Amino acid sequence: MLKRLLNLHDHEGVCHADDIGYLFRLTVADFDVDPNTPEYITRSRFIKMWTNFAKTGNPTPEKTALLDVIWKPVEKDRTYRLNIDKQLNIEEYIENQYTKFWDSIYNGTAAQKGKFFKRTPPIIES
């Protein structure tokens, strides 16, 4: 929706915060969404997945007509992503150059070494 608002039609993929317009009505981008469009279905799916996640911790706890997939949890050696398009598809996430770049930044940081947050709660003496 942000790309639509800013007329960025030549950029492939999603922009930062594109999902916000699917969840909330924005006064700066107050588009009416026709119920017979893929955008309306995507918006309904987004709202349902966030609601499911808030209630159960699982965005797709069961298959339904709207959400016809089960998003598998992360396994030790496998990560799955949900490709949200006209059809929902679960795909195994293959690490690529972009994730390696961010991993290289994260590795060696205080957060990665456990120094950013204390691992045990403080002791409060009464």
Image (cartoon, helix red, strand yellow):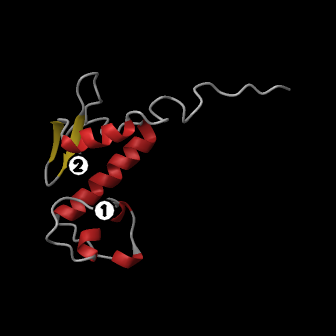
Q: CA distance from mark 2 to mark 1?
A: 21 Å
Question: Are the two marked residues, 2 and 1, in contact with CB atoms closer than 8 angstroms?
Answer: no
Q: Quadrant of residue 44?
A: bottom left
Where does residue 31 sit, x and y in percent of width and height?
Answer: 29, 76
Disc 1 secondary structure class? loop
Q: Amino acid at mark 1?
A: Asp
**Residue beneath the point at 15% across and 62% down:** 12
**Residue beneath the point at 32% across and 60% down:** 16
Considering only vertical position in the picture, is 109 above or below 41? above
Q: Write down the residue under mark 2.
A: 66
Marker disc for residue 18:
1
Circle 2 crowding by C-alpha within 10 Å: few under 14, some 14–19, many from 20: few
Circle 1 crowding by C-alpha within 10 Å: few under 14, some 14–19, many from 20: few
**Residue beneath the point at 24% across and 23% down:** 77
Visible residue check, residue 62: yes
Disc 2 secondary structure class? loop
> Which residue of the protein is positioned furthest toward the top in this rendering?
76
**Residue beneath the point at 78% across and 27% down:** 124
